[in-house]
Amino acid sequence: MHVVIPLFPRYTTLDAIGPYEVLRFIPDAEITFAAVETDPVPADSGALAITDTTPLDEIETCDIVVVPGGPGSRAENKRLVDWLKMIHPKTRWTTSVCTGALVLGSAGLLNGIDAATHWNPKVVERLKELGARYVPDRVVVNEEHRIVTSAGVSAGIDMALDLAARLTAQMTAEAIQLAIQYDPQPPFDCGSPDKATEDVQQRALELLGSATV
Amino acid sequence: MHVVIPLFPRYTTLDAIGPYEVLRFIPDAEITFAAVETDPVPADSGALAITDTTPLDEIETCDIVVVPGGPGSRAENKRLVDWLKMIHPKTRWTTSVCTGALVLGSAGLLNGIDAATHWNPKVVERLKELGARYVPDRVVVNEEHRIVTSAGVSAGIDMALDLAARLTAQMTAEAIQLAIQYDPQPPFDCGSPDKATEDVQQRALELLGSATV
């Protein structure tokens, strides 16, 4: 089971690392971080970069693709978009986290289907322009098109556990959840816009704007 | 607010990236990934390495330390242990995720106090040998000693949100939770050993053993 996680400059690190940390425990999984441009690949914050990646254009087939989001997902990304068009017919599942859905959309993979993404209204608007029907769910599975999209940043962990159950047995996915001790207990309850005040929403958008390069 | 995340060879990536993705949104935060040995620093799985780090011995003061776990945390780690002994008297909070608690313990920082770590019985036993009182909580805050420890891998996200609220205003921490859309909805409910069958626990320990290098 070959899992490819393409990294473009200014990806959001948790978008990529959440699913990675789940999927790597699938017994026959091989995980490849692939550089869309050059290696090392700098994260959005500028605080770190990931290296030891494989050039994306060397990957001609794989089972699972996980496209992370981040400010870099809103760039043109022609190389990644063309690669997605080539690879998607061969995958078992093509998936995205956060604004990674915009890259899937740019490749025409979300045309006319339901999709999740980050709740940021500008992102939602862009997703719709790309032909998708936005739904405010955490994980959206389209079995017919073999596409899974998920909400912002941390949602990739939930998505990957769902995928792990589909790809193995539920018992294995449960064991992975326990291995990463994923028994979430956030100290507050405003992780989605319907649970947050207008003020908190505005502040979150400000933080997202100022913390990304 | 200077946050340092030391990376030793064979750290578990999500242990480091979960707290990073929260703490980087604190408005005046500066995040430094520090290499305990050499850069780039390879993750436990061998699938990636983090680069653009700062040599640990160049860091003489900071506000927050987050020590991740991973198989590398059980090595001797003399350099990191000595650094922790030097830096802890200067920090506002010295913290750990998962088996990072063993490194804090080796530095003598958990002697006689409550601490959380990964639920793996061998890890718990080692933590006790290092003088800590293990508690099966997700996040354990010791205000007197300025120490925060957390449970396995994914628990670092919850810990960092708690820290963000202590370091800023709760409203800012709530906005960070919304920015990373942390509204967890795992598809199963066995993220801690008291929620999992013996079989799932055994399988999780097997996966942890086989997936780490």
Image: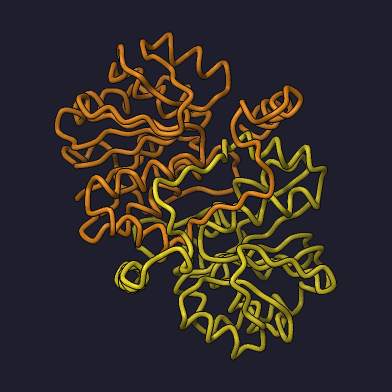
Chain colours: A yellow, B orange
Please identify the quarter of the rendering in which residue B28 is found. Answer: bottom left
- Residue A157 in the figure: left or right of residue B36: right
- Residue B49 in the figure: left or right of residue A206: right
Image location of residue B195, percent across then percent down: 64, 30
- Residue A170 in the figure: left or right of residue B121: right
Q: Residue drawn at (44%, 20%), measured in percent from left and top?
A: B135
Residue A54, relative to residue A175: is it above or below?
Answer: below
Classify the position of the C terminus of chain A by image quarter: bottom left
Image location of residue A128, percent across then percent down: 60, 87
Please identify the quarter of the rendering in which residue A71 is found. Answer: bottom left
Residue B93, relative to residue A96: is it above or below?
Answer: above
Q: Can residue B206 be seen? A: yes
Q: Residue drawn at (80%, 66%), measured in percent from left and top?
A: A91
Q: How many labels does the image show?
A: 0
B184 or A61, which lies in front? Answer: B184
Image location of residue B90, percent across then percent down: 14, 33
A136 or B37, which lies in front? Answer: A136
Q: Residue drawn at (74%, 66%), measured in percent from left and top?
A: A141
Q: Can residue A41 be seen? A: no
B29 or A174, which lies in front? Answer: A174
Q: Residue drawn at (55%, 49%), measured in percent from left and top?
A: B48
Image location of residue A51, percent across then percent down: 50, 55
Please identify the quarter of the rendering in which residue B132 is found. Answer: top left
- Residue A123 in the figure: left or right of residue A5: left
